[in-house]
Amino acid sequence: MTTLDAPWFRNELQKRMQDLLGDYRQRARAVAESSEQLVASIATLVKGGKRLRALLGWWGWQAAGGEASDPRIIDAGVSLELFQAAALIHDDVLDRSDTRRGQLSVHKSFEQLHREQRWAQDGAHFGISAAILAGDLALGLSEEVFSTTADATAFATPAREAFNAMRFEVMTGQYLDILAESNIPDDPTTALEQARTVLQYKSAHYSAVWPFEIGGILAGADETTLSAYREFSLPLGLAFQLGDDLLGVFGDPELTGKPSGDDLLEGKRTELIAHALNNLDSEKAQMLNNFLMRPDNSPYSVEQIQQLVEDSGARATVEAEIQRLGEQTYAALERLNAPDHIRGGLEQLVTGLLGRQS
């Protein structure tokens, strides 16, 4: 079996993805020259990113006996990256987020295009409409690529079932996320449970559990193997997203590509915020709640609210949880029945992800 490293896979993945999107750009131009921009917006977005999901799929494939250089797992990685692109495009619309990876988010890019071209009607509405279509297109392309890839293996049915489950969980988890910003529970325990449910189904499963499992399924992994996969990937996915929640409140814009305290400005009801509200006295909890509901109308600055969350002890609680989940991840990795170079590659990936959260 050929031994290849993560940089090789990232490079092959990027080439395949841009070639594929180049073909779709030509197809768009055949419809109308102006429609190419829809595909171009996806191609621009997928030039960046950690490739976490594609890499986990690749390692999961290899751990189940798949050949590292097999073009089918590269195409599966492309599908996972396009799925991620669709989720990001729609997520930025739902969160009213202006930036992504240090650049304008897709809906803001289309709004800027509208403004520069001095087109008629409302530019903001045009931007959101175009982004919804771009996200839908990315999701459709993801499913198209995955369907072809799965059909080229002997495990098309279970692979499709896993992909469909991933898509369903992300959509329902995303709905629960926006619901949490409107239907705010009074009970702190309920708020924490609600935040963990969103964390698990909107983010952790599709960031780590499903990609790793899909890679294994495509290579023929049995249920015993997949169970061991989940013992590793679930705590990893939870820790990764908890770290993202910390970055969303306390992160350096140079690292996150978003403004400082962006999750606070978007009113996100994360597990971090649930812990803060649980720990604060009623007056300070109301202060935090009011800011999250109307940051543009608050007498307090983002920096003051960041300090409030810090002083509540919520940050320390989440950091301790990330540490605990990280230890679970490493322990499960030690137990994983896979060649040393695969465990080594996964360990390097985990260390990079969890180290990024500190």
Image: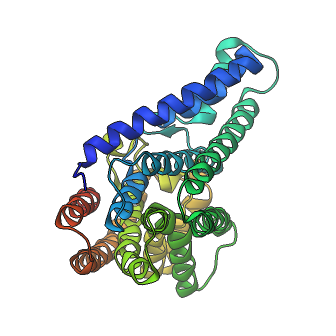
Rendered residue at 18%/61% (across/down):
341
Rendered residue at 58%/70% (across/down):
158
Rendered residue at 65%/73% (across/down):
184
Relative depth, front residue between 269 and 167 = 167
Residue 243: tell me if it is visible: no
Relative depth, front residue between 264 and 115 = 115
Q: Residue furthest right?
A: 121
Rendered view: 322 above or below 227: above
Rendered view: 141 above or below 41: below
Colour setup of the view: rainbow
Q: Position of residue 120 (x, y in %)?
A: 81, 18
Quadrant of the snapshot with the N terminus: bottom left
Q: Is residue 182 left or right of residue 85?
A: right
Residue 139: tell me if it is visible: yes
Q: Quadrant of residue 108?
A: top right
Q: Is residue 217 left or right of residue 93?
A: left
Q: Position of residue 343 (x, y in %)?
A: 22, 66
Q: Is residue 59 left or right of residue 57?
A: left
